[in-house]
Image: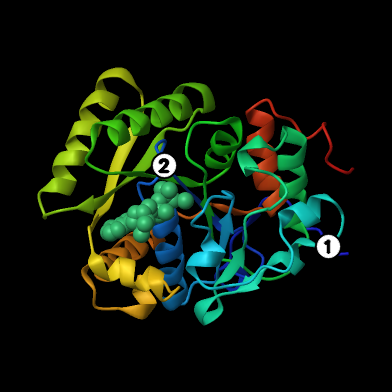
Amino acid sequence: MPTPIPRSRPVMPSDAATAAPRVIAVASGKGGVGKTTTSVNLAAAMVNAGQRTLLLDTDLGLANVDVLLGLSPRFTLADVFAGRCELADTILEGPNGLMVVPAASGKQHMAQLSPQEHVGLVHAFSELDRPIDTMIVDNAAGIADGVLTFCQASHDVIVVVCDEPASITDAYALIKVLNRDRGVQRIQVLCNQVQDASEGPALFEKLQRVTTRFLDVTLNHIGSIPRDEWLRRAVQRQEAVVDAFPSAPASVAYRGIARRARSWQSPMVARGHVEFFVDRMVAAGTGPDGGLPA
Ligand SMILES: Nc1ncnc2c1ncn2[C@@H]1O[C@H](COP(=O)(O)OP(=O)(O)O)[C@@H](O)[C@H]1O
Ligand SMILES: [Mg+2]
């Protein structure tokens, strides 16, 4: 049994091993805009910068994280839920020590899990006894309950958007429901597949104009990723572009975003994974009553 993590202790510099990981959710509303690409490359860039990083794939789509990185899952979260293995058994070793938890087969989408199963997953994270600085959660498209819960339970949400009407509309819809129903007040916006240096800021402006008018939310433009042919070549090689082609324009941009993300304000207290998630879930009305072992 792992040692329980003490409640609300101040974070000491030497305490990194027991401090709660910074959790970053990547979402978009619309599919196909670059969530998984962003999750993989941000995670890889963070690992390369010395951060102990875990990438959690919650979307069983076609372009899974494990496929993109050429990894072969032995167990998935479905096995954890079924009691067939521990969470630690699902962790694949990715490039340079990146920890990858692959999408659960057996459920079409993590977003379809019940709140009890979400809490079960959360509980499973408490069993992890390896230190993690940053956890990146790659979400499914849409605004299903599971996506919203993962976003709400994270310290920061990156909304990936590209310059097409459906992407902007869906990003707005996601931000609106996160803000109004889930109390999220800060959103990091990543503009993807931009064609030139001015497209990102202009796209961010467009999104900010509507959110300022109708919502009580602060948007921050964390950066833009150019549409980059090197990225497609990296996909063919089943590698992150930041590893396969470090000087490609997209790689440079991802490293910049990873650097800025590291400077976001840290959680003030060391809190266990479960405590952090469960607190947020209780606040969301999901509650730990439905299934969390005592
Ligand atoms: N900046 C980019 N430049 C070129 N292609 C990109 C870029 N971002 C994403 N893609 C491509 O777009 C497609 C969808 O990306 P993906 O990350 O799977 O989207 P999502 O996870 O949001 O559904 C993939 O084929 C991916 O390689
Ligand atoms: Mg995806």
Which numbered disc, 1 or 2, marks the residue closer to the eye?
Answer: 2
Instruction: Please state if 34 lies on the left or on the right of 200 as rendered.
Output: right
At horizontal 68% and vertical 53% (from top left) the residue drawn is: 104
Of 269 and 234, the residue lying toward us:
234
Horizontal and vertical percent position of residue 30: 39, 37
Q: Which residue is mark 2?
A: 31
Assign the C terminus to one quadrant of the image.
top right
Horizontal and vertical percent position of residue 16: 59, 69
Of 217 and 62, the residue lying toward us:
62
Of 34 and 91, the residue lying toward us:
34
At horizontal 56% and vertical 31% (from top left) the residue drawn is: 144
Instruction: Please state if 229 lies on the left or on the right of 128 as rendered.
Output: left
Is ligand 2 less than 8 Å from the beta carbon at label 1? no
**Residue 273, can we see it?**
yes
For mark 2, give the secondary structure: loop
The number of numbered discs placed on residues in the rendered structure image is: 2
Q: Which residue is mark 1?
A: 85
Query: Label 1: few (<14), some or many (≥20) within 10 Å?
Result: some
**Residue 35, can we see it?**
no
Horizontal and vertical percent position of residue 151: 52, 40
Is ligand 1 less than 8 Å from the beta carbon at label 2? yes
At horizontal 27% and vertical 71% (from top left) the residue drawn is: 230
Residue 75 falls in image quadrant:
bottom right
Give the vertical position of 116 relative to 214 (above or below): below
For mark 1, give the secondary structure: loop
Lower sequence index among marks 1 and 2:
2
At horizontal 82% and vertical 31% (from top left) the residue drawn is: 289
Residue type, label 2: Gly
**Marks 1 and 2, Cα distance to the nearest angstrom?**
31 Å
Instruction: Please state if 52 lies on the left or on the right of 193 as rendered.
Output: right
Residue type, label 1: Cys
